[in-house]
Image (cartoon, helix red, strand yellow):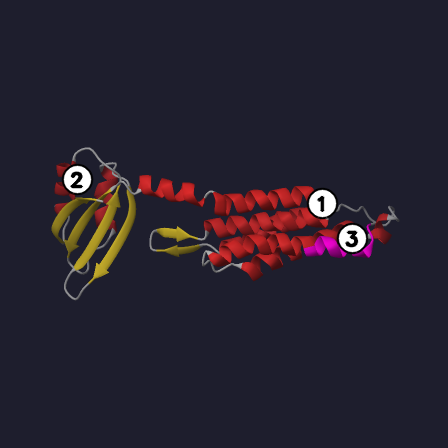
Amino acid sequence: MPETMELLLRLLLAAALGGAVGLERELSGQRAGLRTHLLVGLGACTFTEASAFGFGYLAAHPPLTTLDPSRIAAQVVSGIGFLGAGAILRYGINVRGLTTAASLWVVAALGLASGLGLYVEGVVACGITLLALVGLRPLRTRLQRVKSAAEEMLVEADPDLEIGSLVRPLSELQVRVSNIRIQDDEDVRRVTLTLRPSGDVDTVLARVASVHGVRDVEWTRR
């Protein structure tokens, strides 16, 4: 069993690695930020140390029980999913928090690695995580710009129009809707649909215009 100071250093490393990832999430304005990630990493490390080194007496007496230190790691991996699910939020048809949920999952792994004394592996994994979160951000922005080379359909309709009645005909025409924005006024509902470039614009316009409750349809290129 490692010395007490060695175990304490592992806890500090897990907290530092988790905090480093959490700081990036904090600066990105995510709900699960510095403190959450730090605590996840620290907790995972503590569980690992308790599992690997906290049952020495039982390990020294095989007739009493069978010790399996890897079981706690499996429980951490499955248990962190509940916390990650809490970081995922849905705004209309858009889902946010997937990256933060993934970072929480990775931070749990960093804690496990630190608790087992895999220092180099933990530090390298933390570096790769930060590279993915920060270093790849310009690439993500560029990809989003390419993705935004889409077209928008502006629909004015009755205030009680259901959005599904607009999406269904587009799906039938195999037109992909990447975003929907809704603005409700007193007597009109304005819906802006961001679409992937499609072939026959006139067909799409005519199909949407035929939906009951639609008053006007316009097509613009972003």
- Which region is colored magenta? 2-12
Mark 2 near mark 3, Cβ–Cβ under 8 Å? Answer: no
Amino acid bearing label 2? Val
Q: Specify the label residue 204 is tagged with.
A: 2
Q: Earlier in the sequence, mark 2 or mark 3?
A: 3
Label 1 sits on residue:
70
Residue 152 position in % (x across, y down): 21, 46
Label 3 sits on residue:
6
What separation in Å lies between label 1 and label 2 (alpha carbons)?
A: 56 Å
Query: Element at badge 1?
Result: helix
Predominant SS along the magenta part: helix
Q: Is residue 175 positioned above or below 181 on the image? A: above
Magenta-span inclusion, residue 69: no
Q: Give 2 or 82, whichever is nearer the viewer.
A: 2
- Residue 48 visible: yes
Amino acid bearing label 1? Ser
At 88% from the left and 48% from the top, the residue drawn is 60
Residue sticking out furthest to the bottom:
186
Q: Residues within 10 Å of mark 3 (few under 14, many from 20)?
A: few
